[in-house]
Image (tube, coloured by chain):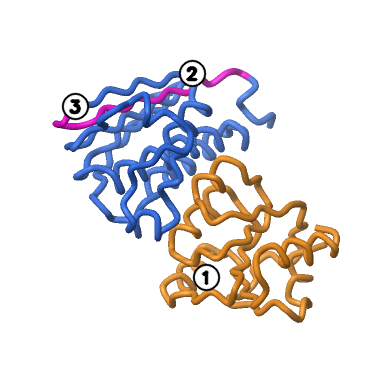
Chain colours: A blue, B orange
Amino acid sequence: MAPYSREYDIKRNDIANAGTVASLTKRALKNLGLTGEFIKQVTIGVYEAEINVVIHSYGGQAHVTIDNDFVEIIFEDKGPGIANIEQALTAGFSTASSYAIENGFGAGMGLPNIQAVSDEMDLQSSEDGTYLRIKFYIEEDDYASA
Amino acid sequence: MHLRNLTEIPEFTLLTSITNPDQELHGLFASDLLSHVMGNAHEGDILITVLSNINVLGVASLLDLSAVVFTHNADVPEAVLRKATELGIALFRTKLPTAETVILLHNKGV
């Protein structure tokens, strides 16, 4: 199978379209016959990361790769960066704006949720931007039996 | 209990049409924080919330939730109703507070 590869722009504060990357990735995984449980894990991770770019950054991109034995998504944004990564990974810690909170976000659960569902997570951040790579390994039993 | 049975509950008003009336209802999830919904709700759950913005539908659709019940008589924007119709998500509204809605549905066997 040729790797599936997609790139998406994610705009700052574009809450109405937040979830597009997650939704299209979910559809691609469904078409490959992966189980609902596997798809849910990836969908949660992608959605949370996508929301983070929308509500916390000046905008960025998502790169989605699906290969035979893994799904990898890289999010890169243009800043302002995460001041304290350790705090950001603490469940319940939030720096979300009131705009984000009014829209149901900002519970401080985004990164902890991503960490919980993914097999690998690499997070780097500076004032120039944040890089987040999340990877999910596809095992044989992640394919729904025909 | 099936999705169509929700239309028979006098306290509930159906705001959209129902595309899959025979869907079985297994569980409930109540929260106004979308990350909690995302991380903890299960496929087929009814979401009970006071949040009525477009992102609720994004989460409902990503998790394949069965329906959303807006409590406290929440205002539901026209754009949300249109999007729900497009996605085939059944939306209900009730004057009841969230906790009472959970109890009511629980007593009906959901």
Q: Judging from the image, what secondary structure is the residue with disc 3 in?
A: strand
The image quarter containing residue A72 is top left
Question: Which segment did they paint magenta?
Answer: A126-140
Q: Are marks 2 and 3 on the same chain?
A: yes
Expressed as whole percent of the image width and height from the top left, the position of residue B18 reads 65, 71
Near mark 3 (Cα within 10 A), the count class, few <14, some 14-19 or many ≥20, is some
Residue topped by disc 3: A126
Q: Nearer the viewer, mark 1 or mark 3?
A: 3
> The numbered mark 1 sits on a residue in which chain?
B
Q: Nearer the viewer, mark 2 or mark 1?
A: 1
Residue topped by disc 1: B85
Q: Is residue B3 above or below residue B74?
A: above
Distance CA(mark 1)–CA(mark 3): 42 Å
The residue that appears at 44% across and 30% down in the rendered structure is: A90
> The numbered mark 2 sits on a residue in which chain?
A
Q: Is residue A50 left or right of residue B80?
A: left
Residue topped by disc 2: A69
Near mark 1 (Cα within 10 A), the count class, few <14, some 14-19 or many ≥20, is some
Q: Is residue B14 left or right of residue A68?
A: right
Expressed as whole percent of the image width and height from the top left, the position of residue A80 reads 18, 37
Q: Between residue A100 and residue A75, name the one nearer to us.
A: A100
The residue that appears at 50% across and 45% down in the rendered structure is: B35
